[in-house]
Amino acid sequence: MTTILVTGATGTIGANVVSELQKLGAKVRVATRDTSKAPKGTEAVDFAWDDAAKVAQAVAGVDAVFLLTPLVENSVPYVQTLVDAAKKAGVKKIVKLSAGGADNPSFDLLKRHTEGEQVVRDSGIAWVALRPNFFMTNFVAYYPPDAEGAIYLPTGEGKAAWMDPRDVAEVAALALTKPDWDNRALELSGPAALSVADVAQLLSTVSGRTIRHVDVPESAAKSAMEGMQLPGWMVEGMLGLHGVVKQGWAATPTTTVKDVTGHAPRTFEAFAKENASAWKK
Ligand SMILES: NC(=O)c1ccc[n+]([C@@H]2O[C@H](COP(=O)([O-])OP(=O)(O)OC[C@H]3O[C@@H](n4cnc5c(N)ncnc54)[C@H](OP(=O)(O)O)[C@@H]3O)[C@@H](O)[C@H]2O)c1
């Protein structure tokens, strides 16, 4: 049976990758800093990105790796450590979670994905780069409405083709277990381009509250993040990401989810209905 190592396995994308792989009958090894959090039916391995010995232990004996780096200032050395260990261990494939726009990065945080993709491509191991659009879950994890129902974001009327993390995970699981997309970068998106105001309207409908987008100048968003003591690299990264939405650079839906999985990508309407409790007061 194929054994697959999943990094980031307790997070938004990784947890879904684990369950999709289990549905496909793969044996899953979960890399985590806290092995008690490993999902049922998986093998847990104590993991730390900056500990080469732990990384080597994690990749030993696996066929393929799902490589997801967390939000850190510079993830490239993490990718390098894992790729070096994977080469030594004879891993046959690496599927790297990257980000939409990594082919033409406009700010440092995105450039890290571009550089990480390059490290994986240079390894000589079969690879797939997944470049997803913005996640729908960001409206739960990163910018939920405040107590008054306001979502303050400097995105203007810009749109993105927000996607359901489960679609990313389904594509990842298939890419990990089949050769069909080897040595390719896959641009992934949801089915439709929506502005933050469009999303707020959907969240209002499912939650029964009035939720609205408040467009703010970039300078105000920057001051607010600095006021929350976010480090400079993260403030710059978040402003870069919001700029991508504002400019409409992530507004073109792709057909990749349908092409790979055979079904249309999940809609924001469906995601909002399923997760309505997240936006009720
Ligand atoms: N959000 C978006 O719209 C979007 C769009 C495109 C691409 N991406 C990319 O997606 C990736 C993030 O995926 P995600 O949202 O699924 O991640 P996540 O939910 O934040 O989970 C990341 C996991 O990484 C592990 N981890 C290891 N070291 C960590 C550290 N120092 N700090 C925090 N977590 C650490 C944690 O697991 P343990 O605690 O078990 O170790 C955590 O569960 C990033 O590379 C990002 O650039 C995001």
Image (cartoon, rainbow, N blue to C red):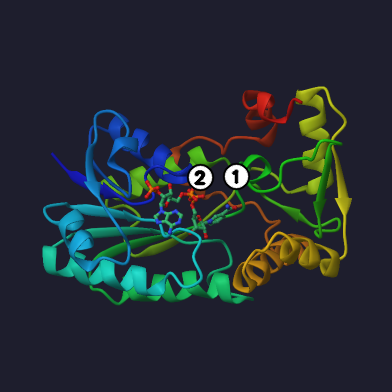
How far is disc 1 from disc 2 in space, using C-alphas? 10 Å
Q: Is mark 1 within 8 Å of ligand 1?
A: no
Foreground of the two, 185 or 196: 196
Residue type indicated by callout 1: Met
Specify whether 146 is left or right of 62: right
The location of residue 99, given as percent across then percent down, is 53, 61
Give the residue number, with chain letter if any, for mark 2.
257
Q: Residue at x 59, y 52 (%)?
A: 254
Decide: is 189 above or below 198. Answer: below
Query: Badges 1 and 2: C-beta atoms under 8 Å apart?
Result: yes
Give the residue number, with chain letter if any, for mark 1.
163
Q: Residue at x 84, y 36 (%)?
A: 149
Of the 4 image quadrants, the one containing the N terminus is top left
| 1 vs 2, front mark | 1
Q: Quadrant of residue 252?
A: bottom right
Crowding near the residue tagged with mark 2, few <14, some 14–19, many ≥20 C-alpha atoms within 10 Å: many
Q: Earlier in the sequence, mark 1 or mark 2?
A: 1
Decide: is 270 above or below 132. Answer: above
